[in-house]
Image: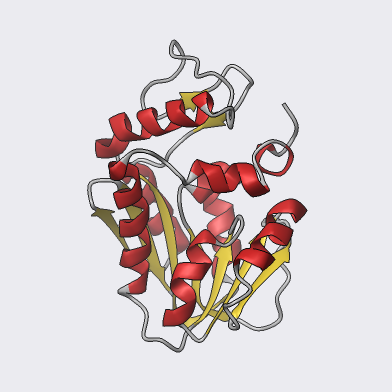
C-alpha cells in the first residue's frame, strides 16, 4: 500500500463512486451530516474544509455560506472537483496537505467531516490544536466520525465498495470494534464518544459531543 491511500488508490472518479451507494441508509447518513453543519450556519461564514475530496460537501454548503475553501492532497480529486464545483462561484478547491496548512486569513468555520481524523492518519490531539489556530475567535470547528450505532450499515457500505473494486477485499477476521481492515492494507478506524470527549477537553475550549441521526458523532469546538 502507498503512503496515502486516498491520494494513490481512491481518488477522483473512484471516490465519486464511493458515494453512489445502493443503500438508502448510507444516503441518509451523508445527508444528515451535511444538514447538521448547515443548520449551524448564518449564511455569511468563511469556511475551510479539510480533506474535501472532490467537493461533495462543499457543493451542498456553498449556497449557505459566504465562501468555502476545500483542500485535498490528491491533485486528481481537485481537478475533478473543480469541474464538479464550476457553478459554485464562492467555492475554491486547492491541492494542499492537511498536515501543512498555510492560510493567512482565519476562518469562521472549519470542517473535518466523514471520519476525516481517521482518513488523514493524524494524531488528533496535536492536530486539532493546529487547526484551531486557523479559526477566528468565536468561530467553530466541526469534526465527525461514525456512531457505534451505524456499524452494520457502515460495514455493508464498505463491503459494497469492495465489490465495486474501490477497496480491497474486507478482512472479516480483523474487521471489528469499529475498525474496518481490507486485505490490501487499508484500515479505517473511528473516534468513540470517549475519544471525542477527550479531544474536546484537550482543546482547552468550549466543546460539545453530539450523536446525529444514529450515524455520526460530532465534536464541535468553539474558540
Q: Where residue 5 appears, x then y in whole percent?
A: 67, 36
Q: Residue at x 58, y 54 (%)?
A: 126
> In the depicted view, which residue is nearer to us: 27 or 184?
27
Q: Where residue 48 appears, x then y in whole percent?
A: 57, 71
Q: Is residue 33 above or below residue 194?
A: below
Judged left or right of residue 24, residue 105 is right
Q: Residue at x 33, y 39 (%)?
A: 23
Q: Quadrant of residue 149?
A: top left
> In the depicted view, which residue is nearer to us: 17 or 202?
17
Q: Where residue 26 appears, x then y in whole percent?
A: 34, 44
> In the depicted view, which residue is nearer to us: 33 or 117?
33
Q: Where residue 50 appears, x then y in whole percent?
A: 58, 61
Q: Quadrant of residue 52?
A: bottom right
Furthest residue in direction top, as rendered: 173
Q: Is residue 49 above or below residue 134?
A: above
> In the depicted view, which residue is nearer to us: 130 or 10?
10
Q: Residue at x 44, y 29 (%)?
A: 160
Scheme of colours in the image: secondary structure
Judged left or right of residue 121, residue 7 is right
Q: Quadrant of residue 34?
A: bottom left
Q: Residue at x 29, y 29 (%)?
A: 152
Q: Quadrant of the N terminus?
A: top right
- Please say whether residue 53 is visible from this viewpoint: yes
Q: Quadrant of the C terminus?
A: bottom left
- Please say whether residue 207 is visible from this viewpoint: no
Q: Is residue 26 above or below residue 185?
A: below
Total marks drawn? Answer: 0
Judged left or right of residue 208, residue 133 is right
Amino acid at each position: 500500500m502507498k503512503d496515502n491511500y486516498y491520494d494513490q488508490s481512491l481518488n477522483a472518479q473512484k471516490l465519486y463512486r464511493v458515494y453512489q451507494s445502493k443503500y438508502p441508509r448510507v444516503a441518509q447518513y451523508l445527508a444528515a451530516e451535511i444538514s447538521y453543519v448547515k443548520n449551524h450556519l448564518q449564511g455569511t461564514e468563511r469556511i475551510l474544509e479539510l480533506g474535501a475530496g472532490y467537493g461533495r460537501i462543499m457543493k451542498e454548503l456553498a449556497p449557505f455560506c459566504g465562501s468555502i475553501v476545500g483542500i485535498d492532497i490528491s491533485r486528481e480529486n481537485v481537478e475533478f472537483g473543480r469541474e464538479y464545483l464550476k457553478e459554485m462561484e464562492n467555492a475554491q478547491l486547492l491541492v494542499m496537505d492537511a498536515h501543512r496548512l498555510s492560510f493567512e486569513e482565519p476562518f469562521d468555520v472549519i470542517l473535518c467531516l466523514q471520519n476525516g481524523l481517521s482518513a488523514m492518519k493524524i494524531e488528533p490531539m496535536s492536530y486539532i490544536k493546529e487547526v484551531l489556530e486557523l479559526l477566528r475567535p468565536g468561530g467553530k470547528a466541526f469534526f465527525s466520525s461514525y456512531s457505534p450505532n451505524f456499524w452494520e450499515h457502515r460495514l455493508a457500505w464498505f463491503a459494497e465498495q469492495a465489490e465495486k473494486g474501490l477497496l480491497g477485499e474486507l478482512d472479516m477476521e480483523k474487521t471489528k470494534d469499529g475498525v474496518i481492515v481490507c486485505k490490501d492494507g487499508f484500515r479505517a478506524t473511528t473516534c468513540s464518544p470517549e475519544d471525542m470527549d477527550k479531544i474536546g477537553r484537550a482543546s482547552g475550549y468550549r466543546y460539545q459531543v453530539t450523536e446525529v441521526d444514529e450515524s455520526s458523532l460530532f465534536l464541535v469546538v468553539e474558540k
